[in-house]
Amino acid sequence: MSTKFDAIILGGGAAGLFCAAVAGQRGKRVLVLERGEKVGKKILISGGGRCNFTNIGAGPANYLSANPHFAKSALSRYTAADFVALVEKHDIAWHEKTLGQLFCDGSARQIVDMLLDECAAGPGEVVVRCEEEIASVTNDIGGFVVTTQHEAFTSRQCVIATGGPSIPKMGASDFAYHLARQFGLKIVEPRPALVPLTLGGEEVLFRELSGVAADVEAIAGKTRFKEAALFTHRGLSGPAILQISSYWQHGEPVAIRFLADRPAGWLLETKRSAPSLRLRGILRDALPARLADVLADQIGIETDLGNVSDKAIRQAEERLANWQFHPNGSEGFAKAEVTAGGISTAELSSKTMEAKRVPGLFVIGEAVDVTGWLGGYNFQWAWASAHAAAQAP
């Protein structure tokens, strides 16, 4: 077998496999090099093993980037509906959970198998090789030379699809950034995203609620998410916290709005209509008892509402609507579902994902400074950015 290819894709994850499949169906000879023992490892663990493969509402507003407009082109040219059509073409049953999240009815393995089937379906040729450690990547007028521990391969094009350093136990690394720097591409400082936050100091008492969850609104700056929050033995987690973690800046507070569906003035109205009720009982009716007791203890109102001043009632309601937590950090890349930051979009064409200063070099997926919300958005970016790169001549 010749070692010469039209394109070499570094990384056999979601973006890499889909890029290979689309390029192969356009008649190209493609090599996928994967460091791990198998491809698609993050796909297999996603969504509790059922793969939250896209989100029907995916659009540019659901992504963080130093350039919030960058993702528009790729996302508009390959949509969630396009990927759903592919899933249905392969007779994979799926269902929608909350907030537009789509999952396989069966196993995430179906998505990996579908991508491999798509790789095999085209007029071109897609070669997938696992357990390949990349020793070097060089380029000259003739193209790229990628050397592994086994041999050297040449190609006109090279695609960086090795992701970011989140979940290192799955083989993730910062290889993409080292390669980008080698080629003179700028990096937006990578940081853990969709990650649990840790608490210390006086807030350590909330760790005693480990395992307790409640629907809340989490707020950081001007950004807010209404979903469940989970107290852990280290701090805060759950969908609302994972979402807000991507926007949280170290040293800033995270505000939690408990009883987020209650209208303004609800507690004062309760005092008027049922003055014999007590705050602790009201909270216990609406929240898990352990959480209700901690909140009630912190607020300190123990008598009937009818015996409490309107000012104290308003202050209690305001605190429940804006409970300030001061995270001392996060659980880091080890527990982060994705990486925020990455290879700067200023270096790339939004249409093709090609590096402006290095013809033939492309960057797709999580390696790029485009980070989606929790709920299938990062997979949709993987599909869309991969599709954009695969369309390049």
Image (cartoon, rainbow, N blue to C red):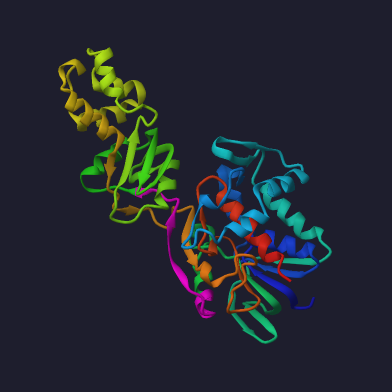
Relative to 349, does residue 139 appear above or below in the rendering?
below
Closer to us: 359 or 293: 359
Front one among 106 and 22 = 22
Magenta residues?
A: 179-197
Which quadrant holds the C terminus?
bottom right
Q: Is residue 143 above or below residue 232?
A: below
**Residue 14 seen in the figure:** no
Quadrant where the N terminus lies?
Answer: bottom right
Is 259 on the left-hand or right-hand side of 50?
left
* Residue 152 lies in the magenta-colored region: no
Looking at the picture, tell me which residue is in the foreground, 31 or 101: 101
Image location (x, y in percent) of residue 322:
29, 38
Image position, residue 51 (x, y; %):
61, 45
Q: Is residue 342 left or right of residue 101?
A: left
Give above or below for 297 relative to 29.
above
Q: Residue at x 73, y 60 (%)?
A: 21
